[in-house]
Image (cartoon, rainbow, N blue to C red):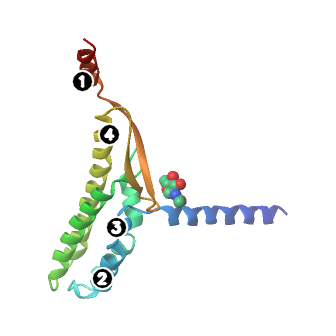
Amino acid sequence: MFGQGRLGQAMALLLFLGMTAALARGCLQCDPNFAEKFSFYRHHVNLKSWWVGDIPVSGMLLSDWIQNTMKELHLAIPAEITRKKLYQVAEAVYQRMDQLYQGKMYFPGYFPNELRAIFREQVRLIQNAIIESRIDCQRHCGIYQYETISCSNCTDSHVICFGYYCKNTWHKQDEKMR
Ligand SMILES: *[C@@H]1O[C@H](CO)[C@@H](O)[C@H](O)[C@H]1NC(C)=O
């Protein structure tokens, strides 16, 4: 009985871990071109470095890209991004990637290092995009909301914020009343 209970717990834990891994998505996958772009990148790593050791490392970076993005975001607010900003970030990432893939063969270490640099830049762009929208939202007066998509499951969502910039509005109302 005890053994079975332990096994049950272990399985529940594994299922839970499996689920969180499946839920741990990272924004860029919500872009319509992501699948095609990253499939291309994954299938063309093998000719990008003189050193064979770079190939599995680069392959891992690409296949774990989305999971690692969510881990690196470190946001204190939910990862909800506006569609427009998401597409802008995605375009910037593809542009740098495409440029990297135009090169034929790189010296040892160069290719995975470039991938890491693009990854870090992407994380920074996503963080900025999410935070900027939230700050813009707070530049309104009172309860305000804007349309987003959820980075974890790509469904439409919206963010509601409370805007703190009410002074001007009060001024105008005062003037009208006079
Ligand atoms: C998508 O994720 C968001 C935030 O994580 C959650 O609030 C929402 O319920 C999820 N939607 C679906 C359809 O799973």
Alpha-carbon distance for marks 3 and 1? 38 Å
Q: Note whether 138 is above or below 128 in the view shown.
A: above
Mark 2 vs ligand 1: CB under 8 Å?
A: no
In the rendered structure, are the residues bearing label 1 and label 2 in contact, judged by CB atoms less than 8 Å apart?
A: no
Residue carrying label 1: 168
Q: Helix or strand or loop: what does disc 1 sit on? A: helix
Marked residue nearer the N-terminal end (2 or 4): 2
Q: Note whether 39 is above or below 61 in the view shown.
A: below
| Marks 1, 4: nearer the viewer | 1
Alpha-carbon distance for marks 2 and 3? 15 Å
Front-most of residues 81 and 8: 81
In the rendered structure, are the residues bearing label 2 and label 4 in contact, judged by CB atoms less than 8 Å apart?
A: no
Residue at the location (22% across, 73% down)? 97
Q: Helix or strand or loop: what does disc 3 sit on? A: loop
Marked residue nearer the N-terminal end (2 or 3): 3
Q: Which mark is residue 31?
A: 3
Q: Position of residue 141 (x, y in %)?
A: 33, 30
Residue reaching furthest to the right: 1
Residue carrying label 4: 137
Alpha-carbon distance for marks 2 and 4? 37 Å
Residue at the location (50% across, 62% down)? 23
Q: Helix or strand or loop: what does disc 2 sit on? A: helix
